[in-house]
Image (spheres, rainbow, N blue to C red):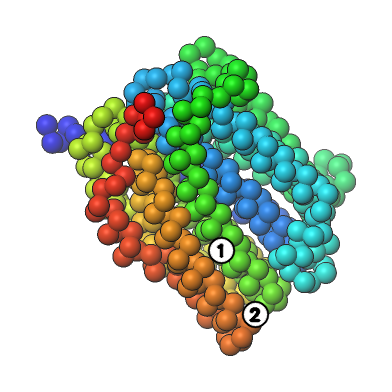
Amino acid sequence: MKEREVHDFNQKLLKLVFPIAFQQFMLALVSASDAFMLGMLTQDSLSAVSLASQVTFVESLFLLALTIGLSMFAAQYWGKQDRAAVERIFGYVMKITVVISFVFFLAGLCIPGGLMRIFTNEQPLIEGGKIYLRTVSPSFLLTGISQVYLCILKNTGRAAKSSVISSVSVVINIILNAVLIFGWFGLPKMGIAGAASATVLARVIELTWCIWETAKKDSVKLRLCYMIHDDRVLRHDFWKYSFPVLGNEIVWGVGFTMYSVIMGHLGSDAVAANSITNIVKNLVACFCLGLGSGGGIMIGNALGAGCFDQAKEYGSKLCRLSILCGVASGMVMLVFSPLIFAVTDLSPAADTYLKWMLIMCSCYMVGKSVNSTTIGGIFCAGGDSRFGFLCDTITLWCITVPLGFLAAFVWHLPVVLVYLIVNLDEFVKLPAVYRHYKKYKWVKDLTVSDNA
C-alpha cells in the first residue's frame, strides 16, 4: 500500500510539475532571447530593455497574487468537484485582472520616460526603455487576461494544455524577435521596438488560443454573468485569503525591484551583469517554481477533498524534494557558466561582475527552491498566506533593502559585495519558514466558508 501511495504521488506530481516547469522555462527563454539578440546590437540596448522589463515584473506581481488566489480556490473546489464554484471564482478574478492590467497598459503607453527614471539616471538607457515600454504596452493587458485563462487550465486537470499554449507562444515570440530585431525577410531592422512588437504579437496568439480552448465542450467557461454579478460569499473568502498574497507579492516584488534600482545606479556594467544573471536565474529556477506550483495544486486538491493526512504527507515529500531541486539547480548554473560567457559580449568589468554573481546565485537557488515550494506552494494551498507577507516584509524591508542601500550609497562597497548583500533574503527567512511549516496552519479546507 505504501509503495502504491508513493507511486501515485510521483505520478500526480510529474503530471503537474513538468508541464508547469516547462511553461516557466519557456517564458524565461523569451527574456533570454531578448538579452542575447539585443546584446548583439549594443550593451546599452540589453541594459535598457532589462530595466524597462521591471515594469512587466511589477505587473506580474499583481497577476501572480491574483492567480495564486485563484489557484487556492480553483484547486480545492475542483477537488470537491464543484464546477460552478470554479466558474464563479474564474469570472470574478478575470474582472479584477482586466482592471489592473489596463492601468499598466496606460502607464506604459503614456508615461514611459517617468517609469524609466525610477530605475536609472543614464539618458541612453532611459531613451531605449521609453521605446520599449510604449511599444510593448498592449501586451500588459493581453498578458493579464491570458494568465488567468492559463491558471484555470492548470487547476482543472489541463496543465499539459496550458503548457503547450504558453510554450508555443514563446517559440513564436522568439522567432518574431529575430525577424523584427534584425529585419529579416526584407522587413525593417527595428531593434528594441522589434523585441517589444514580437511580445505583443505573441500575446495576441496566446490569448486567442486560450479563448478557443476554453470554448470547447466540458471546459470550465468564463461566464459574463459571473463577471458582472459576483458571489458575495466567494468574493469575501477570496480577498480574505488573497489579500495577504497580494501584500506579499508587492512587498517582495517592490523589494526585489529596489535591488534593480540599486544596481541600476552602479553603472551600465553592473546593470548588464545583473541583467544576464537574472535571466540565467529565471531559467534555472523553473523546475523549483514548477515544484511549488504543482505541489500546491496537489495539496489543494487533497484539502478540498478533505484528505488532511494525505496533504501533510504531500507537504513532507515536497519539502525534501525542494532541497534536492535547489542543489541540482545550483549545480546546473555552475556547469553552464562557461557557455553563458561564450554567448555574451560584455565589457571586461561586466564579465568579472557576472562571474561572481553566478557563483552567488548557485548557492541562492537552494533557499529559493525551499521558500518557493513552502511559501508559494504548500502554505498558499491551504490559504495560509499571511505568513509570507510578514516574512518578506521583515526580511526585505528591515534587513536586505536597507543594507543594500547603505552598502551602495553610504559605504560605497564594491559591486560584487552589494550584490551579495541584496541576495541574502532567501537564506535569512529559512529558519522562520521551517518553524511555520511544522505548525501545520496551512492544513485547511477553504471550501468550507466561515460564513456558511
Residue type at mark 1?
A: Gly
Residue at 44% in and 30% down: 74
Q: Can you give x and y, in whole percent of width and height, for residue 104 in the image? A: 71, 46
Disc 2 versus disc 1: nearer the observer: 1
Q: Quadrant of residue 186?
A: top right
Residue at coordinates 77% horizontally, 65% vertically from top-left?
117
Looking at the image, can residue 34 be seen?
Answer: yes
Q: Amino acid at mark 2?
A: Ala
Q: Which mark is residue 349?
A: 2
* Vertical position of residue 209 compared to residue 197: above or below: above
Image disc number at residue 255 = 1
| Identity of the residue drawn at 58% across and 46% down | 62
| Residue 1 found in image quarter | top left
Q: What residue sits 36% from the left and 26% below the top?
A: 452
Asked whether, in this view, residue 289 is left or right of residue 432, the answer is right
Q: Is residue 334 visible?
A: no
- Residue 435 located left or right of residue 57: left
373 and 182: which one is in front?
Answer: 373
Category of crowding for the residue at label 2, using alpha-carbon neighbours closer than 10 angstroms: few (below 14), some (14–19), many (at least 20):
few
Q: Residue furthest front?
A: 451
Secondary-structure class at tag 2:
helix
Mark 2 vs 1: CB contact within 8 A: no
The dot on residue 404 is none
Q: Residue furthest toward the bottom?
A: 411
Query: Which residue is most to the top?
Result: 217
Using the numbered discs, state the Cα–Cα distance from disc 2 to disc 1 in whole angstroms.
26 Å
User: Which percent across, then down, holds residue 258?
Assistant: 61, 66
Residue 111 position in % (x across, y down)? 81, 53
Q: Nearer the viewer, residue 214 or 198?
A: 214
Seen in the picture, residue 430 relative to 448 is either above or below; the reply is below
